[in-house]
Structures are given as structure tokens and as C-alpha cells.
Image: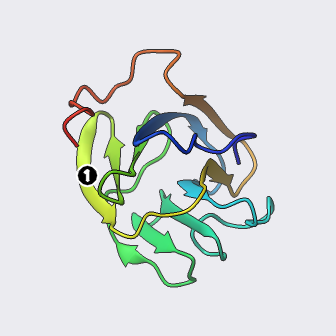
Amino acid sequence: RANHPIPPQCKLFYFEVDIIDGGNNKRIIIGFCEKLFGLNGVPGMNDYSWGYHGYNGEFYCCSLIGSPYGPLFSTGDTIGCCLNFKNNTVFYTKNGINLGIASRNLKGTLYPCVGLGSQGEIIQVNFGSRKFKYAGNLEWL
């Protein structure tokens, strides 16, 4: 989990995760959570968290049961996550391509988070210090 929450005045928040190495089991999860989410939890599968799971392409919303969402992802992929507080939606991107809305129930004070589930997983998170792979217009959302 990030050290700081998404600023409350922020209407649109986007970050990307470069997957350098998917590790042994490729169990990388990209998501967001509330402060109450345990740091050893699995994003999306535990209370106070939501996550897009790379090993099965499902989106999880505070539940052990996911919903089919997007393609699998692993080594070499870049996954983006856009939280739109204007219309309370979330969408993800894979290698710069918008995958569509994953959730329509966004609310609360949220933190970006990533789950790593096996040895050897290496990621790099970009909060805007580098150019994003997603070239779509985030302003119109």
C-alpha cells in the first residue's frame, strides 16, 4: 500500500505498474484499498480492498469471488489503474490500452496498492514521474 492516500481534492487519479519479473507464480495484483486493509492481505480478496489479478484476469471487490474482467498479465506488461472520483468508476489499462470499467462503486479515502504473491516478483510503480504508457485523455473522464 502507498504511504499516503489519494488526495481528497483529486477527481482523477492514475498510476501504472511495470512488471519487470512475474516471479514464480505470477500472482501480481494491482488495486487500491482503504487504510483498514491489512498489509499482508490480498488486494480485492480481503475487506477494504479492490484488485485486478494478473494470474486469472478477474477483478475482486472485497470478496473471495472475482468477476471476469480483462486479460492475464505478467512479465513485460504495464498495468494502469484509473480512479475517477467524478463518476465513481475505476478502469485499468494493459500496455496502454483501456480495458473498460472494472467497478462503478468507488468511494472513501483510498490508497494505491499492489499485491505480490510469490518469490521473484519485481515491479516498478509510476505515479507520474515518467511518461505513462496510456496515451488516452484522462481529462474527459
Q: How many badges with numbers are in the image?
A: 1
Decide: few, some or many residues near mark 1? Use Cα within 10 Å; few <14, some 14-19, many ≥20: some
Residue 6 on image: x %, y %? 58, 43
| Quadrant in the rendering for residue 103 | bottom left
Type of amino acid under label 1: Leu
- The image quadrant of residue 69 is bottom left
In this rendering, would 114 be left or right of 97? right
Q: Quadrant of the C terminus?
A: top left
The answer to whether 129 appears left or right of 89 in the picture is right
Look at the picture and state if 24 lies above or below 105.
above
Please state which of residues 54 and 111 is positioned toward the viewer in this rendering. 111
Secondary structure beneath label 1: strand
Residue at the spot x=75%, y=40% of the render?
3
Q: Is residue 134 above or below residue 24?
A: above
Spot the residue most to the top: 130
Q: Position of residue 28 (x, y in %)?
A: 58, 53
Work out whether residue 109 or residue 51 is closer to the camera in this orientation and state it.
Answer: 109
The answer to whether 80 is drawn above or below residue 58 in the figure is above
| Visible residue check, residue 36 | yes
In the visual, does 47 lie left or right of 119? left
The residue tagged 1 is 99
Which residue occupies 30% across, 30% down? Answer: 134
Q: Nearer the viewer, residue 3 or 80?
A: 3
Give residue 9's position: percent from left, percent from top: 50, 40
